[in-house]
Image: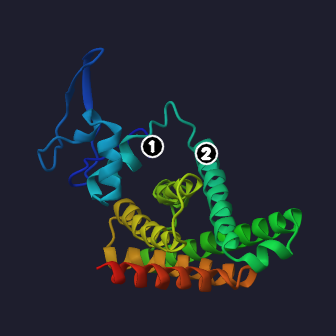
């Protein structure tokens, strides 16, 4: 993600510049020297189109976001990483509270202070296990050791699906929605890892699956009923869906 790390969104080939600006609002997109196509057509796309393509897991838009959208000359990468970590943990705490909210017995037995401490310890422990296991799996399966910060930045950026949890502040959804968000989070992390390492999708899924599984197992130490709540809600939602069909 350095200044010279611009990539063609089509083939991933390094390019020196993405466009030439003749005047404000008047630019010409550059072509890739490898595939001879426009290096990054997303420069002229609206953010909504970029967001939709991210949801669709298109490799092109992941290359745009991870390599071309962040300018190291104007953005402090280290500060951005810490901001993303804070947002990630904050959303994870909210996720944990949502699941605990459905567990009435736990909600009424714990005081707000004790509940906050338990949630914070659980979230920090689970995510520490996630980062450590992800680093080990990345080194073992992908042999990536030199770009740890860039890869972790890509993982946190690709965890944007956690934002959808905020919709539960406004609308009431079954707890199974959190399960689907977790699945989309896994696939999004895998796509980001594939784009950044240019490895096979199978290996990238394996790395992310290992890290998320260890994160889940560590989380169960502090929240043993959470998984049962998710599964119960999912089965209830599926039975309701099939009754409608």
Which residue carries the number 2 mark? Answer: 78
The answer to whether residue 201 shows anywhere in this view is yes
Q: Position of residue 45 (x, y in %)?
A: 27, 37
Q: Is residue 176 above or below residue 90?
A: below
Q: Position of residue 136 (x, y in %)?
A: 56, 77
Q: Observer-nearest residue: 242 or 49?
A: 242
The quadrant the C terminus occupies is: bottom left
Q: Residues within 10 Å of mark 1 (few under 14, many from 20)?
A: few
Q: Say which mark, if any, is on residue 168.
A: none
Q: Is residue 154 above or below residue 174?
A: above
The structure residue drawn at horizontal position 59% and vertical position 54%, both measured from the top left corner, is: 169
Say left or right for 112 vs 77: right
Q: Position of residue 228 (x, y in %)?
A: 61, 86
Residue 172 appears in which quarter of the rendering?
bottom right
Q: CA distance from mark 1 to mark 2?
A: 12 Å
Which residue carries the number 1 mark? Answer: 2
């Amino acid at each position: 993600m350095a200044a010279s790390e611009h990539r063609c969104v089509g083939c991933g080939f390094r390019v020196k510049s993405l466009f030439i600006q003749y005047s404000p609002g008047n630019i010409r997109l550059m072509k890739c020297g490898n595939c001879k196509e426009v290096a990054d057509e997303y420069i002229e796309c609206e953010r909504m189109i970029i967001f939709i393509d991210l949801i669709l897991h298109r490799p092109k838009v992941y290359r745009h976001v991870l390599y071309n959208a962040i300018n190291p000359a104007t953005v402090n990468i280290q500060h951005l990483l810490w901001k993303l970590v804070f947002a990630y943990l904050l959303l994870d705490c909210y996720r944990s509270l949502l699941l605990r909210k459905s567990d009435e017995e736990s909600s009424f037995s714990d005081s707000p202070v004790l509940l906050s401490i338990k949630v914070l310890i659980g979230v920090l422990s689970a995510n520490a296990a996630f980062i450590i296991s992800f680093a080990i799996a990345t080194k073992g399966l992908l042999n990536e050791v030199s770009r740890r910060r860039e890869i972790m930045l890509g993982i946190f950026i690709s965890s944007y699906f956690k934002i959808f949890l905020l919709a539960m502040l406004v609308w009431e959804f079954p707890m199974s929605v959190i399960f689907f968000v977790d699945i989309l989070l896994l696939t999004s992390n895998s796509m980001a890892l594939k784009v950044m390492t240019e490895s096979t999708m199978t290996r990238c899924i394996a790395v992310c699956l290992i890290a998320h599984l260890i994160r889940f197992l560590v989380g169960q130490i502090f929240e043993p009923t959470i998984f049962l709540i998710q599964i119960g809600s999912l089965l209830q939602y599926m039975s309701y869906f099939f009754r409608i069909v």
